[in-house]
């Protein structure tokens, strides 16, 4: 049986000097080619879980596993495979791109930092990545301030996918965008997932985005998972009172 590509087993994290765990006793599995949403109020622990899954923080309890093996930040060979396989799109398209660098250099950064390609070899891959997200190849010669917010998020997605990762972790990838642009970026993520077989883990406050993109949903409250399962079941017939409160709090147009 193929192990999940990413897994948390009874994971917990308490920051140094902290009086309480930020997250505790969290178990999640992310199967290859599947999608998982992490939802909950601000401070529930969603971004902390994403940091654990990215290897940016070590759990103080339990473990993070990659392809069935515990993720060790001291195992350079494993960490290299992990960094190539798992990439992230951050929340703010304005601050996640270096304003002093041209787009081509920004998108090519994973290729260089992971030792996949040098400058010459990166050029066609950068052009292909930009085309894949709906931007012309000449965008590579321009700077971030020349693009709109939605275009910048497309650039961030191109950077995250240029090295053909297996897993994309997205932290509120559309929350900083206007409604029309948000729909376009959600459609783009759905296309990439379908066409490239990407595994997607997404933090989001927007339950409509979750419903359209993710097959499974985990609901966090106070650093713990209170409910998880098929998205249609979790959002359509929630079992936990906290999940019901989250759904009830979604603004609706008057009938």
Image (tube, helix red, strand yellow):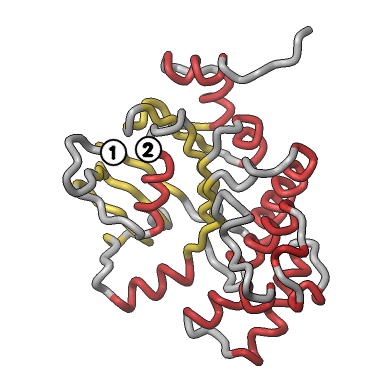
**At 53% from the left edge and 63% from the top edge, which residue is drawn?**
166
- Against 114, residue 226 (above or below) is above
Q: Which corner quadrant of the image does residue 250 belong to?
A: top right
Which circle marks residue 152 in the picture? none
Secondary structure under tag 1 reads loop
At which x and y percent is residue 205? 55, 33
Which circle marks residue 22 in the picture? 1
At which x and y percent is residue 231? 55, 31
Quadrant where the C terminus sits is top right
Q: Are marks 2 and 1 in contact (CB under 8 Å)?
A: yes
Q: Earlier in the sequence, mark 2 or mark 1?
A: 1
At which x and y percent is residue 146? 77, 64
Within 10 Å of the Cα at label 1, are there few (<14), some (14-19), or many (20+) other Cα atoms?
some
Q: In the image shown, does 123 or 139 lie closer to the viewer?
A: 139
Within 10 Å of the Cα at label 2, are there few (<14), some (14-19), or many (20+) other Cα atoms?
many
Which circle marks residue 45 in the picture? 2
Q: From the viewer's perspective, is 175 left or right of 140?
A: left
Secondary structure under tag 2 reads loop
Q: From the viewer's perspective, is 168 left or right of 48?
A: right
**At 62% from the left edge and 73% from the top edge, which residue is drawn?**
100
Q: In the image shown, does 156 or 197 lie closer to the viewer?
A: 156
**At 72% from the left edge and 83% from the top edge, which residue is drawn?**
124
- Against 148, residue 74 (above or below) is below
At which x and y percent is residue 187? 74, 47
**At 78% from the left edge and 72% from the top edge, which residue is drawn?**
139
């Amino acid at each position: 049986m193929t192990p999940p590509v990413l897994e948390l087993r009874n994971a917990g994290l308490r920051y140094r000097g902290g009086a309480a765990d930020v997250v505790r006793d969290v178990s999640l599995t992310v199967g290859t080619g599947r999608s998982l949403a992490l939802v909950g109020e601000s401070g529930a622990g969603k971004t902390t879980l994403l940091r654990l899954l990215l290897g940016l923080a070590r759990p103080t309890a339990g473990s993070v596993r990659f392809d069935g093996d515990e993720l060790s930040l001291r195992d350079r060979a494993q960490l290299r495979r992990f960094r190539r396989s798992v990439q992230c799109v951050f929340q703010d398209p304005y601050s996640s791109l270096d304003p002093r660098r041209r787009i081509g250099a920004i998108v090519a950064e994973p290729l260089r930092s992971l030792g996949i390609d040098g400058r010459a070899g990166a050029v066609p891959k950068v052009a292909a990545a930009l085309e894949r997200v709906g931007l012309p190849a000449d965008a590579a010669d321009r700077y971030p301030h020349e693009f709109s917010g939605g275009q910048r998020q497309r650039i961030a997605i191109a950077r995250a996918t240029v090295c053909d990762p297996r897993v994309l972790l997205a932290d509120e990838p559309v929350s900083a965008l206007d409604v029309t642009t948000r729909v376009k970026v959600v459609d783009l993520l759905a296309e990439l997932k379908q066409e490239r077989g990407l595994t997607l883990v997404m933090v989001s406050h927007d339950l409509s985005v979750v419903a359209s993109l993710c097959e499974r949903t985990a609901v966090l409250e106070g650093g713990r998972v209170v409910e998880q399962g098929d998205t249609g079941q979790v959002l359509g017939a929630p079992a936990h009172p906290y999940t019901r409160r989250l759904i009830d709090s979604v603004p609706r147009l008057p009938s």
